[in-house]
Image (cartoon, rainbow, N blue to C red):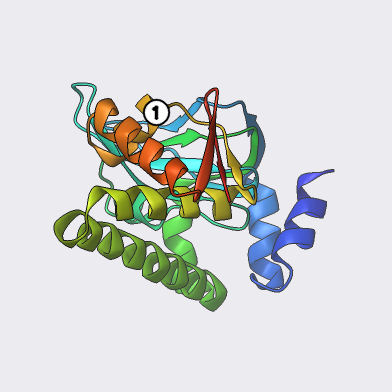
Amino acid sequence: MKIDEIVDEYFLNIFEKNLRNEICKYAVLKHAEPDKIILEIRREIKFIPLIISGVAKVMRRDGKGNGILLHYLAAKQTSAIAITYAIENKNSEIRIKAESNISYIAIPSKVVNSWFEKYKSWRDFYLKENQKQTSLLIEKINNIAFENLEFRVLKYLEYTSLTHKDKTINRKHFDIARDLKVSREAISRVLKKLEKEEMLSLGRNKITLN
């Protein structure tokens, strides 16, 4: 499909016609395989990714190999954090990485700022994404501060399953430990306990929720 067909199919009821026309004029349709980095920390934000299909992971990294999952991006979503950095002309402080095969529309950052003044639908879209992603971050902070690891692992698995629309999650214990910022051994203990409680089934590099 051409970009104008994709924009009309996915965003007909989200963006007004003139905005859809500008997206088609300035943006580029791109694809990325799993683990491909779309936006990197401490780099200039040259474009804003608008997800068409697949799932992307938004992470915070410290440059020393440590990181934590902030949230996912799925179809018809973008990163409100990336937009905020772009309009303030700041380098990125997040990493966006393809979690699966994804297609996305790359919108040049230089045109995004003008859309806030020109298009109500863009302002509404940004505010909705920002509210949703802020709520996810607040929930994550609450879970880290007040909930035990078993609860956090279950919430992580449920969120990942819901985002991918699949009860089977293809993930190593190490990957979960990295996303939750805990040790792999602790994750393995919790997963085995949850399996004994028949809440999930463990396979080779995969977990299936019951």
Mark 1, residues whose alpha carbon is within 10 Å: few (<14), some, or many (≥20)?
some
Looking at the picture, tell me which residue is in the foreground, 62 or 198: 198
In the picture provided, is 162 more to the left or to the right than 9? left
Looking at the picture, tell me which residue is in the foreground, 111 or 206: 206
Looking at the picture, tell me which residue is in the foreground, 119 or 148: 148
Rendered image quadrant of residue 100: top right
Residue 82 image position (x, y, % from top left): 37, 49
Q: Residue at position x 68%, y 68% from top?
A: 18
The number of discs equals: 1
Q: Is residue 92 among what the camera can see?
A: no
Residue under circle 1?
173
Q: Find the residue positioned furthest to the front.
A: 196
Q: Residue at position x 37%, y 35% from top?
A: 176
Identify the secondary structure beneath mark 1.
helix
In the picture provided, is 98 more to the left or to the right than 8? left
Q: Residue at position x 39%, y 38% from top?
A: 191
In the picture provided, is 200 more to the left or to the right than 69? right
Residue 112 image position (x, y, % from top left): 47, 56
Q: Residue at position x 18%, y 21% from top?
A: 64
Q: Is residue 160 among what the camera can see?
A: yes
Residue 143 image position (x, y, % from top left): 24, 59
Residue 41 image position (x, y, % from top left): 29, 32
Q: Which quadrant would the N terminus be assigned to in this image?
A: top right
Above or below, 14 relative to 194: below
Above or below, 177 relative to 138: above
The amino acid beneath tag 1 is His
